[in-house]
Image (cartoon, rainbow, N blue to C red):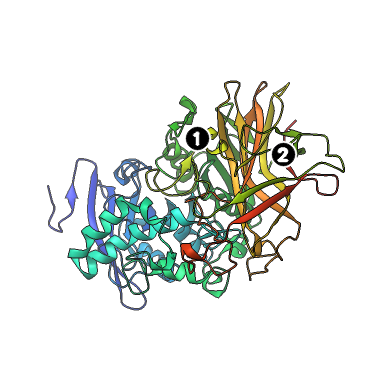
Amino acid sequence: MADAQGAVMSDTIVQETLESKMRDGTVLKADVWRPAAGGKHPVLLIRLPYDKSQGEDLCYAHPSWYARHGYAVVVQDVRGRWASGGEFTPFESEADDGEDTMSWLGSLPFSNGRVGMYGFSYPGHTQLQIAVRKPEGLRCMVPAMTSPDLYEGWAYNNGAFALAFNASWATFLADDVARRRDPDLEPTLAAQYAKVNDYYWWLPLTAIPNLTPGSPGGFFADWLAHETKDEYWKQWDVTDKLPQVSVPTLAVGGLYDVFLEGTMANYRGIRRGPRSDDTRLVIGPWYHMPWMPAFGDVDFGPEARNQVDLFQLAFFDQWLRDGDPAKGARVRAFVSGANRWHDFEDWPPPAKPWPLHLRARTRANSISGDGFLSEEAPGSSEAPDTYSYDPATPTQSRGGRSCCLDFVAPMGPYDQRPVESWNGVLVYSSEPLAKERLVAGMIRAHICAATNQPDTDWVVKVCDVDPSGRSINIQETIQRARFAGGTDRSRPIPAGTVTEFVMDVGTCAHLFKAGHRVRVQVSSSHFPHWDRNLNTGNPVGVDKLSDRKVAIQTVLHDAAHPSRVELPVLA
């Protein structure tokens, strides 16, 4: 039924839509779920571009669930999205509008003045933009699966454009832009999203339909136009401001999430601030969404089920309702391989680097080669490995850490043997382990390599190979060669120059069991997770397929060039 103000009533919940006016007069709309009994309640805020009517309940419990636990939940459409007024430019207005929204929340008759925030992905980043401004009333937040930096780890990784994520996300966002401009165009965008995998092959990238300047997804063109970390990206980067956050924070991430490193950056940064003792971290096994125990080729078992609502409800009860302090260690991480939760006092935990050198007796090309990993460093005369990389036939992604749904982007753990069957992938495997190794922290790689072209990419992937031969990806990264010296500008490496590429492969919490092997892949593409490097050295997005150059790649592993990975092993 409905009351006189049009609010929908149930025995326990009131649901209503409210308006708030921003500093420039733009009106934003929010759906509110709150207890029907009246009185004042702590408020939970989500600000999102994905339609307030669903409240990110693809992964979280519906907002009404939190209302039944005594909270007033406010889910707001950000500027220019769905029911809210204004024009939408990703990220542009979130700090000011978030600050204005916080002031508005304090004036609501059902608010007791205590506000917490939650939400993942874009709504996770909106929390950070608010928190660094220290608004009155904010008492705690739970930013999940998000990054403080919208360049590194969002649009780009070490200079390589995160194609599948950003092209599919831009197409998805463009749907609502099209609806507002011309409703007849919306079905076209919906159909393009359904077939977005076909558009990853489109060259030049700047010509993908509906993602060009002035089109509904024109912001995609902006992301391509700013391939270095320039002022465009710096204006939204809150990494250096995180130590200013003055509220308790629970950071939530996933081992296969696109924003895993962003989650770690959030935890580290806020941990350096005044609420260090009240900063906590939860890392599940999940990819971006949905959060479930079995995905890709791996079932992580019953402990991997989504428990985030229970974690954050306890956190909100503590800081918004003076509940009991949180129990357990500061950091709770799911350890893949063991498939169980493990408590840590901090992150990263103390660990000892375990160096494994890339070696080969004759050649390491594919699983048919004889590449191996050895704790022993190579000798002075060990021959390098060589392969060709043609951007027209790139090494294709099989799983990984892209975003946001697995039918539009490569996500999750998969058997890598189809990838490892190609000669353009170097494969190095250890002997079966005599004892288990718990690896927790940042994996690093030192790859000594050269190309005969103006530019190229180097991809490193670490896998766990079980006794049956199944090879599951644990972590991976990419390095665009001309950005190895930093992403502030391009620094081309002369063709033929041997360079040691030092790469943070990524964070992991994984148990390599006795009898399993560690495997390392080295290649030059992971497409469409990242865009194809056409090896020309030109800016991203401008080359046509006919501009491509076939690269001859050399990976060295001798005494002077000890290519290796270093895994952080716990005692």
In the rendered image, which residue does mark 2 sit on? 568
> In front: 51, or 98?
51
Q: Quadrant of the C terminus?
A: top right
Q: Estimate the x, y position of residue 39 in percent, counting from the top left.
A: 30, 51
- Is residue 27 shown left or right of residue 543? left
Task: Judge the density around disc 1: few (<14), some (14-19), many (≥20) Cα neighbours within 10 Å.
Answer: many
Q: CA distance from mark 1 to mark 2?
A: 23 Å
Q: Estimate the x, y position of residue 251 in percent, counting from the top left.
A: 53, 48
- Is residue 11 shown left or right of residue 204? left
Residue 441 sits in quarter? top right
Whether the residues at callouts 1 and 2 have beta carbons within 8 Å, the answer is no
Q: Which of pointers 1 and 2 lies earlier in the amino acid sequence?
A: 1
Question: Residue drawn 72% across and 39% down?
Answer: 568
- Which disc, if any, is residue 414? 1
- Is residue 159 shown left or right of residue 318? right
Give the amino acid at mark 1. Answer: Tyr
